Image (tube, coloured by chain):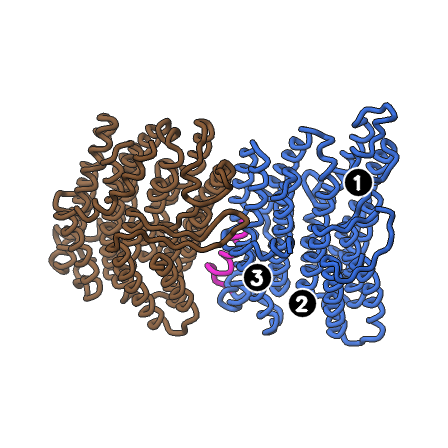
Chain colours: A blue, B brown
């Protein structure tokens, strides 16, 4: 409960900070302090030091897994603001509003990591996405940003409609908003254990969640929105928001997947392979790195979906590790991308000569995204694949996944090639020493988690 | 501890080299580190007690940082340790841009290679397998020839794909182990059905076959060898391809005996096709580097075929040959590099009569060439002899087919020798000078090794005994 209350209150605080503070960097500092407070509040909750409890009649349920995941998300946001705070200030005129919206998004993610009923799922998703529509359109005078915002809004509404329909059908079948659809089915009333309405409702929920995490074939909004949004907010959307969506997806179907029986694995294999195929193959042909990263985020979603395929303890640990690895690498890489003026591959030519620190860190992040050993991304992928093998008898899908992982090397390494092996004079924005230090620390964290993933997972069990 | 140091010294020296300002200091540091590593490797080889280093790493996953040295590990660790000082000495006078990074990456690759040969834990092995690849990728892409970016990228994607398939195979076997452990012993004890072995066998073998490379997965190799800076090519063909062969001995044959028996013939036939194919192409080459590259495919094919022949002498011969071929091919590359550095061309049609201008190089090239065709009294002879007897025990016809490649090897190697150093002096060769001090020293050391082990190969045979015995105990 701490995180939900604190994030809402701090969001309001940030909103008004713009009136009091005239200096943009002071607003950023306030945001950083507020995020630290939020993180601390959430940690206090997970270690039961101090927690505010309000009786929600079982609509919210706080467990270790969800709270820890929420801590990861808040920490990732903190990292994001630390690295890209200066760029948020440049995104538009209303800096304090952007921070307020970010806090409201965090309020949504806090609900999504603790919901215990379909109603709260809906509220969480809405609270999380509505601020994002605004952030996407933050560059008021940029047509692309406006288009992206509108597109995101329309597609978001569309998928929310599907979700509501699904919830309505499930409610109609069971008479309850309970998360565990199977348990609440009125078998005593002479109805079959899994009725048609339930099934239809679950499928609609599945489709809407696929929309939210941009899994194929419901991914079409992602590239345009990620490309059109201001780069700083793309970084935020592609990491924290997406990870929260995955957590909700996992939580929603953990007990309900069995209702669909063997069909579930079939459905998931279709979605996973379609997502990996579309994400990876399309990313190969992109000219703009920002757009390539949009498709790469679809491809990474394909890997995260393995957690829903296997639903075992390895999958749970894996999604935690994946969230950490993916957030670190993507936030880090976007922080570099924002500093380079030209987003095409040629714009990165020769970056290693002019900005060796940026190029080196970017290389580490890209290797992590590609899943090269000694980086966090390797263990993220490792856990996902291991969970599938452990769930038994599905080696073929692992082999397909590794084929796509090999393809992903192609587009990630194209950036490395541009930076290190080609000549050029890339134009960059002003780069401060503290930014470089931060970047190197993030790169070091990526490698540290890649050598000892247990430092993340031990926290979870601590 | 000595096993750990073999990895740590190159790793630490490599990282220090990155941080250095002066290229010459990095060069000297690298040479020093490689000599220290060589001394340690020699110490490791001469101790008869078991060398084990074991420390906790990823407890949750059942993986430990375990290093172990058996005969084959010692032999290949020695090969890695010997080749580096030779390479550094041979390229001592070459100028590289950004030398600190160059030497740093070279040493990181050495750390990775050592790790591959010493790891007694599959996950650790996988880590080192990749750690060896990445520095080499950067080395080839930054300091390579004109077409380097596309060529080395093909190499990287190829091998990375292989590694990922191997990872799938590793996971598959891992979940069959009793205690869910990555330890070598746990993997050796796992009982797999025939069908399971088939799946895992191919997942592993494709990775190793790409690395060696075995026909038809060899297409990355000639281009990469040609485009890489020669110092890197020496590592690639001298040491790195042995990773694939070594991995077959360590992780394939003992784990999947049923599948090995079932598919051994397929692998042998592919290897022999590759040998003949590569030899025929080598005859038509005009570029010295490409010639050596194709000749290398042929040699590796023979070693792979011998490993799968299922006979003791074949396995023994292949292991000895891993070492000998590594040393010999480095010698060939050093000479190719010298010719390119001094004359600016690698085309045999433009060379000729070098013996008149560079007699020392000519003599040493002849020694290397004779070793390349495995003439008796050179180190390669004993290995090839054992390998052929192994293949012969398995199938006479395969031995006969593989035997043709010996004749072809003589054709292209002697043809090269004749075109490069004999005949009338060509215009390009006219202003050649003989090789200098460091290079001469490196080549003489190689020539001495060739002849000493050619006359007295027993130490190598003794060293591989325990590995060979281990391979044939399980059946």
x and y, in percent, of residue B304 in the image? 31, 37
Note whether residue A228 is visible: no
Which is closer to the viewer, label 3 or label 2? 3
Q: Nearer the viewer, residue B148 or B208?
A: B208
**Location of residue A401 (image quadrant):** top right
Mark 1 to mark 2: distance in Å?
Answer: 37 Å
A422 inside magenta stretch: yes
Q: Quadrant of the C terminus of chain B?
A: top left
Please report the residue visible at 77 percent of the width from the left and 67 percent of the height from the top. A95
x and y, in percent, of residue B385 in the image? 18, 38
Q: Nearer the viewer, residue A79 or B78?
A: B78
Q: Is residue B317 above or below residue A105?
A: above
Q: Nearer the viewer, residue B215 or A292?
A: B215
Stretch in magenta: A411-424
Mark 3 to mark 2: distance in Å?
Answer: 15 Å
Please give the chain letter of the residue carrying mark 3. Answer: A
Which is closer to the viewer, label 3 or label 1? 1
Which residue in the structure is indicated by mark 3?
Answer: A445
Label 3 or label 1, whichever comes before in sequence order: 1
Q: Are marks 3 and 2 on the same chain?
A: yes
Q: Is residue B229 above or below residue B376?
A: below
Rate crowding at label 2 as few (under 14), some (14 to 19) or many (20 or more) other CA atoms within 10 Å. Answer: some
A387 inside magenta stretch: no
Mark number displayed over residue B325: none
Q: Is residue A211 above or below residue B142?
A: above
x and y, in percent, of residue B370 in the image? 15, 46
Which residue in the structure is indicated by mark 1?
Answer: A179
x and y, in percent, of residue A207 in the image? 75, 38
């Amino acid at each position: 409960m701490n995180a939900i209350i604190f994030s809402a209150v701090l969001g309001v605080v940030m909103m008004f900070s713009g009136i009091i503070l005239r200096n943009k960097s002071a607003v950023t500092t306030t945001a950083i302090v507020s995020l630290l407070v939020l993180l601390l509040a959430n940690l206090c909750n997970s270690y039961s030091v101090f927690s505010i409890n309000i009786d929600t009649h079982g609509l919210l349920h706080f467990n270790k897994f969800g709270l820890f995941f929420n801590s990861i998300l808040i920490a990732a946001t903190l990292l994001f603001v630390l690295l890209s705070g200066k760029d948020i200030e440049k995104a538009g005129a209303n800096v304090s509003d952007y921070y307020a919206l970010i806090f409201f998004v965090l309020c949504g993610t806090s609900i999504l990591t603790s919901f215990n009923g379909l109603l709260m799922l809906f509220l969480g998703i809405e609270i999380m996405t509505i601020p994002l529509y605004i952030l996407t359109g933050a560059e008021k005078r940029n047509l692309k940003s406006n288009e992206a915002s509108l597109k995101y809004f329309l597609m978001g509404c569309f998928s929310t409609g599907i979700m509501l329909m699904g919830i309505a059908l499930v409610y109609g079948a069971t008479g309850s908003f309970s998360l565990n659809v199977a348990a609440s089915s009125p078998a005593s009333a002479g109805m079959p254990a899994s009725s048609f309405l339930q099934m239809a409702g679950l499928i609609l929920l599945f489709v809407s969640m696929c929309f939210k995490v941009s899994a194929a074939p419901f991914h079409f909004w992602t590239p345009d929105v990620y490309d059109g949004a201001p780069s700083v907010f793309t970084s935020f959307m592609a990491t924290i928001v997406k990870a929260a969506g995955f957590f909700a997806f996992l939580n929603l179907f953990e007990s309900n997947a069995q209702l669909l029986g063997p069909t579930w694995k079939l459905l998931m294999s279709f979605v996973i392979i379609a997502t990996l195929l579309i994400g990876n193959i399309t990313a190969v042909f992109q000219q703009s790195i920002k757009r390539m990263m949009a498709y790469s985020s679809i491809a990474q979603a394909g890997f995260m979906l393995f957690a829903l395929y296997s639903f075992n303890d390895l999958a749970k640990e894996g999604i935690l590790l994946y969230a950490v690895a993916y957030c670190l690498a993507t936030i880090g890489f976007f922080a570099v991308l924002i500093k380079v003026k030209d987003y095409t591959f040629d714009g990165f030519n020769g970056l290693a000569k002019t900005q060796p620190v940026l190029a080196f860190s970017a290389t580490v992040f890209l290797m992590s995204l590609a899943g090269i050993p000694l980086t966090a991304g390797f263990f993220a992928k490792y856990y996902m694949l291991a969970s599938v093998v452990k769930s038994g008898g599905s080696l073929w899908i692992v082999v397909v996944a590794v084929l796509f992982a090999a393809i992903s090397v192609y587009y990630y390494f194209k950036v490395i090639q541009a930076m290190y092996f080609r000549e050029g004079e890339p134009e960059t924005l002003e780069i401060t020493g503290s930014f470089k230090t931060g970047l190197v620390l993030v790169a070091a964290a990526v490698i540290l988690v890649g050598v000892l993933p247990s430092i993340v997972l031990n926290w979870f069990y601590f | 501890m000595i096993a750990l140091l073999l990895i740590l010294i190159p790793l630490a020296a490599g990282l220090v080299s990155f941080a250095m300002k002066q290229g010459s200091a990095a060069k000297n540091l690298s040479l020093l580190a490689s000599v220290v590593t060589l001394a340690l490797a020699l110490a490791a080889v001469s101790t008869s007690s078991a060398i084990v280093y074991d420390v906790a790493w990823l407890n949750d996953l059942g993986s430990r940082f375990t290093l172990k040295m058996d005969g084959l590990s010692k032999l290949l660790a020695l090969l890695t340790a010997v080749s580096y000082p030779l390479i550094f000495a041979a390229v001592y006078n070459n100028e590289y841009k950004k030398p600190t990074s160059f030497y740093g990456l070279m040493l990181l690759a050495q750390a990775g290679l050592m790790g591959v040969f010493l790891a007694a834990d599959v996950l650790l092995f996988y880590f080192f397998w990749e750690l060896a690849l990445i520095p080499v990728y950067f080395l080839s892409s930054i300091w390579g020839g004109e077409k380097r970016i596309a060529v080395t990228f093909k190499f990287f994607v190829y091998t990375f794909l292989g590694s990922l398939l191997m990872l799938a195979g590793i996971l598959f076997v891992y979940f069959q182990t009793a205690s869910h452990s990555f330890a070598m012993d746990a993997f050796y004890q796992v009982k797999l059905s025939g069908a399971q072995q088939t799946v895992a066998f191919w997942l592993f073998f494709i990775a190793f076959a790409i690395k060696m490379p075995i026909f038809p997965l060899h297409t990355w190799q000639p281009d990469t060898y040609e485009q890489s800076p020669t110092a890197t090519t020496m590592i690639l063909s001298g040491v790195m391809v042995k990773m694939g062969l070594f991995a077959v001995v360590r992780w394939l044959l003992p784990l999947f005996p049923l599948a090995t028996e079932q598919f051994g013939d397929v692998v042998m036939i592919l290897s022999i096709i590759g040998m003949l194919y590569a030899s025929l192409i080598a005859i038509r080459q005009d570029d010295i580097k490409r010639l050596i590259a194709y000749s290398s495919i042929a040699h590796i094919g023979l070693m792979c075929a011998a490993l799968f022949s299922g006979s003791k002498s074949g396995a023994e011969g292949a292991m000895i040959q891993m070492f000998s071929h590594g040393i010999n091919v480095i010698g060939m590359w050093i000479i190719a590099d010298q010719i390119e550095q001094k004359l600016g061309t690698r085309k045999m049609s433009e060379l000729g009569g070098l013996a008149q201008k560079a007699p020392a190089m000519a003599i040493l090239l002849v020694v290397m060439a004779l070793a390349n065709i495995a003439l008796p009294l050179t180190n390669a002879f004993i290995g090839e002899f054992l390998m052929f007897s192994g293949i012969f025990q398995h199938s006479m016809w395969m031995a006969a087919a593989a035997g043709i490649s010996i004749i072809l090897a003589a054709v292209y190697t002697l043809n090269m020798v004749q075109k490069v150093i004999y005949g009338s002096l060509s215009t390009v060769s006219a202003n050649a000078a003989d090789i200098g001090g460091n290079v001469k020293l490196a080549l003489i050391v190689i020539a001495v090794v060739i002849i000493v082990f050619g006359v007295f190969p027993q130490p190598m045979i003794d060293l591989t005994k325990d590995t060979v015995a281990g391979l044939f105990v399980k059946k």
